[in-house]
Image: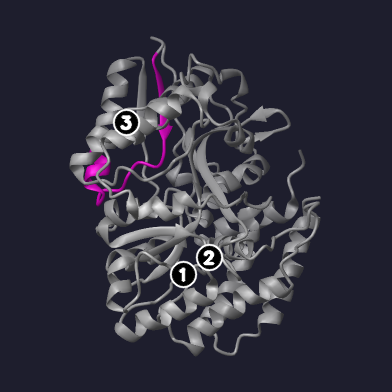
Amino acid sequence: MSAPQYRRVAAFALAAGLGLSLAACSTKSDDDGASADGKVTITVDCMPVGTEKDLLANWNADVAAFQQANPDITVKSVSVGTQCNNPPDFTARLAGGTTTDVFYGYMTDLQQVLDSGQAADITPYLNKDTISTWDDVDPALKSVFTDGGKTYAVPVKNYSMGLVYNKVLFQKAGLDPANPPKTWAEVRAAAKKIVAADPGVAGYADYSAGNTGGWHFTAEIYSQGGQILSADGKKADFNNATGKQVLQNLKDMRYTDNSMGSRQLLQWGDLLTNAAAGKVGMFIGAPDTTQAIVSQFKGKYEDWAVAPLPGQDGLAKATLGGGEGYFFKKGLSDAQIKAGLKWVAYEKLTVGKGQFDYPRAKPQNYPVGVPQPLLFAKDSATAKAEYDLRKANANVDPAIYSQFEAQQLPIKGEPANAQAIYAVLDSAMSGVLTDPNANVDALLKTAEEKVNQLLAAGS
């Protein structure tokens, strides 16, 4: 596969622009990670940061337990921030070859990782010996990390988008928390009421930086029946009435209604920090954003609920789905790949361990009962075991997610070359949220031209 020059140049330019000393922060294991006595060492990222005390303690306990059960494996943990994959930083690490041996990435990152030459083909190692639940992992999720019949990452999370809203702010504004907005017009009306009741909050908040703006633009255009790319994937398909509706609605909420707050250029952590502080009435996100609000940003999960994504004339025509997984750095030894797969299996794909250790999470007040991640095939034994354990240890009122679960909207995946496209669309989102004189038509036209240039470079 030839690497698109556009992305390769952009990646290296970004790395240089960030001013990162990539060589100095290399996380490569010594030699091939193996010693003469048969022991193997792997580096793994996405370790919780120090401020996430319970999560960090859990991670360290899991590493200790895993190493005790596998005395020939040493896991060296690396923290890359609360988000685990901040797209610009991730691109810089790929460009500099400084990823860990086993590294976290979004489902949208496969092409970027392949273009960087950093990914190992792990297909020969994927079996019950390394991941006992592998046969029960949803085949659709496996396919996301597969290219040319070869698999390059293990899926560890799956999500779809809905409308996340603050029930306390709804009540304060005279809105019914049991009847959240079902259309974007209703979202706009509710946001105005929330701000009228409390001028210090954002009635509705949205992303517009770090590729997150483009991500949300994609979800919002999907909700209205639009798409980002043409059916053949060769051209942009958002510079139209649907794309204009998305941006115009946000611009009107920001400047006509003043219902989105004055602080913009928000990324993932920015918005959720504000939400946890009770300063956001609504935003779009997956159900597990409530987990992040509680565990990482110290909010209260009882303040929140999740509803289906709104659409233009009723509930959304489709919702965006996505997720994440772990890649394996090219050049690892067989022993390192097998060790890494065993660690990922333990921490991310074993019911009762790691992310599925619900009995441990419950007394820590980490939300248990969130209807995600949906990793396992619906009728599989592992899916049933995960559901039963989650239900037995639930500490979250199921009503928080009942409306979201009751409406099974069609799920659309993210576009090919998603992160590069999202970076382009950030400019359109930031334009309408930071400039009262922004020209929606011009923003869409410019974004269309840039996305088409990107697609042409990769064809």
Task: Please name whichever residue, 413 or 83, is drawn nearer the observer in this view of the structure.
Answer: 413
Mark 2–mark 1 CB contact (< 8 Å):
yes
Residue 50: image x %, image y %?
26, 48
Cα separation between marks 2 and 3: 31 Å
Drawn side of residue 49 relative to residue 334, left or right: left
Which labelled disc corresponds to residue 310? 2
Query: Which residue does the image show at 32% across and 27% down from the upper left?
Result: 352
Cα separation between marks 1 and 3: 32 Å
Q: Secondary structure at mark 2?
A: loop
Residue indicated by mark 3: 389
Q: How is the image coloured?
A: one colour
Q: Amino acid at mark 1?
A: Pro
Packing grade of label 3 (10 A; few <14, some 14-19, many >=20) is some
- Which image quadrant: the N terminus? top right
Q: Residue furthest top?
A: 37
Residue indicated by mark 1: 181
Query: Which residue does the image show at 51% across and 24% down from the upper left?
Result: 136
Residue 330 against residue 286 in the figure, above or below: above
| 1 or 3: mark nearer the eye | 1
Task: Please name whichever residue, 370 or 200, is drawn nearer the observer in this view of the structure.
Answer: 370
Q: Which of marks 1 and 2 precedes in the sequence?
A: 1
